[in-house]
Amino acid sequence: MRERASGILCHPTSLPGRYGIGSLGRHARALLDFLVDAGQSYWQVLPLGPTGYGDSPYQAFSAFAGNPLLIDLDELVELELLSQDDLADAPVFAQGDVDYGAVIGHRDLVLRRASARLTAGQADAALQRELEAFSGQQAAWLDDYGLFMACKRRFDWAAWTDWEPGIALCQPDAVARWRDELADDVAHQRVLQWLFDRQWRALRGYAHAAGLRIIGDMPIFVGHDSADVWAHRDLYYLDEAGHPIVIAGVPPDYFSPTGQRWGNPLYRWDRMAERGYAWWIDRVSHALEQVDLLRLDHFRGFCGYWEIPADEPTAVNGRWVQGPGRAVFEALADALGGLPIIAEDLGLISADVHALRDELGLPGMRVLQFAYDSDASNDHLPHNCPANCILYTGTHDNDTTRGWYANAPAKTQHRFRSHTGSDGSSPAWTMIRLAMTSVADLAIVPLQDVLDLGSEGRLNLPGRAAGNWTWRYTEEALTPALAEALKALAVVSGRWWDEDEEPASGEPLILAYEPPLS
């Protein structure tokens, strides 16, 4: 990380485009161009996996796979895997949000056309060689994932516990039989993952060439209805039929009076430890092939996690259970040579979580929307932030800052106005200035706040079962004037240097977070 830098949080699904959802094509490159023009150094995204129930990136079908909905269709025309005629009958999608049902139906149709041309040998031979090489390199997770997704389709998208018993329990004879019977669909899944990987690597290369770095996001837990749990049941607390015995969540907090019942199965950390945390090493190293820094969601779960009996309807009746602590990070650091990790340390945090974070030398998080609920000792106020942290105006789980202010209690609004010396007419840009001028090494702002949107721009409301993850911006929203305003603020706050202006040392300042594990 640069010693002082800033960036924008915007998930690819929120990009514009004519096919109903953001993709990894020209609009993604346009966003990166905007970030450069705006004096930004980082692009932060949410988890990139294939979304399942509720379209949440935090409930993916795999901890390793990419989301095929993000594949850019126009590039497939350039590769001659699709023709313009294949796209001519695309529905007229809304430009302001994502209709996942319509998007999924259209994507499945056209991507199967592209896949069929490739697997039938109708595509360039070089592309077929690329696919074969990718399939071999990623076989450790791709083989399981391909069969898992083919079976999902075969069994009408039912959870794997409701499949035919033999394949549900991943019995070798059943796996061999279904792999043969569903060979075409398994091959299709490989093509989708290769296309995603190909486009994402190109986009990351474009970012690096522009001097940008990407911050990814890794949920601590994986979804129960995922290839990871199906293929490795012994690593989770499951009954003989594969159903969770206990599940993850958080107790009542700022976001929900009954807590959050996530439903993810909990790890058998004892078995993870016996195997040298190999699954975690594979998972994190794979993620770091896609991004440069990794926000580790629910970091506190490595110290202690909220265990909820699976038959409980809410998260209220749970208990704290000790996590693996430092051991998993020692294994990761030994394998990876360091920990390019941001610790998501929000919520109900105990002293041992802060101690582990600081012992590892990891930057934590602060959120300005949380700063005005109490007095001047609030940890989220800029004057209480350490340098080694990332300061956000809000996160993907928060309302937009304009929406937050409009719905905040009068006392909270008064504290905000008093602290900032503002009249409350422009809370988003007031907070952006606070974040940028703070001592925090890195300031990150959701794009909705840059655009000064109200609650209509909110991406996620925790606890809401449907209607999340749909927000998109329009192509016209990213104006030169907006970039100029952001860049001016980045320059005056020491988070960007113009081409003609070097930092005092003469060289860009680099701050590497190497954990002191010796």
Image: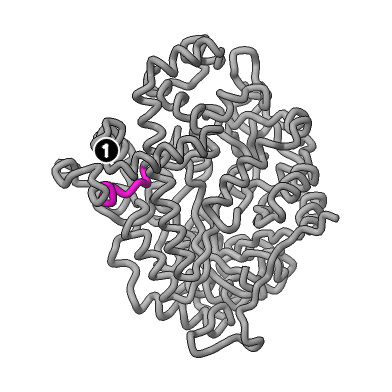
The residue that appears at 50% across and 77% down in the rendered structure is: 423
The residue that appears at 37% across and 59% down in the rendered structure is: 28
Q: Quadrant of the N terminus?
A: bottom right
Q: Is residue 361 left or right of residue 195?
A: right
- Tell me if residue 70 is in the magenta stretch: yes
Give, as a three-letter code, the residue at label 1. Answer: Ala
The residue that appears at 37% across and 36% down in the rendered structure is: 191
Residue sitting nearer the eye, 252 or 5: 5
- Tell me if residue 406 is in the magenta stretch: no
Residue sitting nearer the eye, 235 or 475: 235
- Return the x and y of residue 46 as percentages of the image width and height: 50, 50
Tell me if mark 1 has few (under 14), some (14-19) or many (20+) residues whose alpha carbon lies within 10 angstroms of its own: many
- Return the x and y of residue 458 as percentages of the image width and height: 44, 54
Query: Which structural element holds mark 1?
Result: helix
The residue that appears at 69% across and 55% down in the rendered structure is: 339
Q: Which residues are magenta?
A: 69-76
Q: Is residue 168 above or below residue 479?
A: above
